[in-house]
Image (cartoon, rainbow, N blue to C red):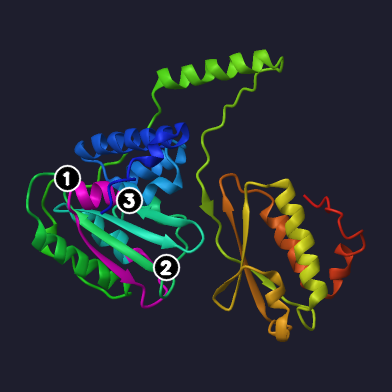
Amino acid sequence: MDTNFMFEHLAEKEGFNSSLKHFRSVTEVLEYIEEGYNFADVLNKLLDTKEISQAQVVPAVFALLHDKYAYYYRSHNMSLTLTDFSKILKEVPRWKAVDIVLVYYHPDLGAQLINPKNPEHFENLHGLKENELITIYVGTPYEQEVQKEAETAIKTLVKYLEGKSAKSPESLLKGKCAYKYFEYEAEEEETEEEEQEEMEEEEEEQEPPAVSSTAPKKRRMTPFYSIPVTNELFHNGNVEAWKKIIQSYKTKHPELEVYIYYDGERIHDIHSLFKWGKVKHGSTILIAIAGEDIQDVAKLQRYLRQGASPQFEAFLKFPVNTILNLF
């Protein structure tokens, strides 16, 4: 490894501050793990409260689970699409011998952390698709050797991920790693300081202080919604109508993302649905919305259904550069 430039990014204020923040976050996570909390539970709470960013997830996984605690791990490509997690939720919470973290590489949301002992982590997990990647980390933050138990846990968990049934091995039922609910609250002193700074800045700008009573919103992804194609063909007019509808939605909700899927694939360019007449009458296009405060989903579905029907022209009656006020 070339060490000549390994600290170069610390020379600038932005690089130094971001690195310092990351080090502090990892240290905070480390303290909670030492108290017996699961890594995925802690990281997800910090993500919800914006204490850390999505970009910090994978480096934190490697720093703590791989380097610090030397968890045993195995990467697994899904051999089928799994939507029923009942076997996992029934058996894995009983495993007290080892701590487990699943890193699911979502194609759109990035690395998602799952504690298979925590049912909350499966509420917004709509399915694990065939060929998607999951890395299973198994170990313990305590000073004890659990190689045999870890290997047993990984093999059994892979069976569940493949839709198979298996009884919980006796060797996994006793130990120090029972599920422990994690509840995170930001330190009051820091919160008060931040609020004071914001109030001072707003007073300088001579604007009334904005008071927010809402709790942090968790970034999530909705289930897939089916949009039937009722036009004889999803042609260029339908494509342009959809572009107008989604543009209007994104203008109203710039923090949200609209994902389009067809035939099991993510559609990055709506025009590809028109090429070669591949989407015909009776076909179904799937959509999902991702973000923190998801709104107007029913209205978006209604407009997209109209845009995929013979009534698509209603969205094309305005000048080309006009952003429709639909939401």
Q: Is residue 197 magenta?
A: no
Span of residues in magenta: 61-86
Residue that badge 1 annotates: 141
Is there a contact, CB below 8 Å, between mark 2 and mark 1? Answer: no
The amino acid type, in three-letter code, at marker 3 is Asn
Residue that badge 3 annotates: 118
The picture places residue 297, in percent across and down from the top left corner, at 67, 55
User: In the picture shown, does residue 325 fall above or below 245?
Assistant: above
Circle 2 or circle 3, nearest the eye = 2
Residue found at x 56% / y 57%: 222
> What's the CA distance linking mark 2 and mark 1?
28 Å
Q: Is residue 182 left or right of residue 283?
A: left
Where on the picture, by quarter, is residue 35?
top left
- Residue 128 shows which numbered tag? 2
Residue found at x 58% / y 79%: 263
Q: Is residue 162 left or right of residue 139?
A: right
Q: Mark 2 or mark 3, which has the lower sequence index?
A: 3
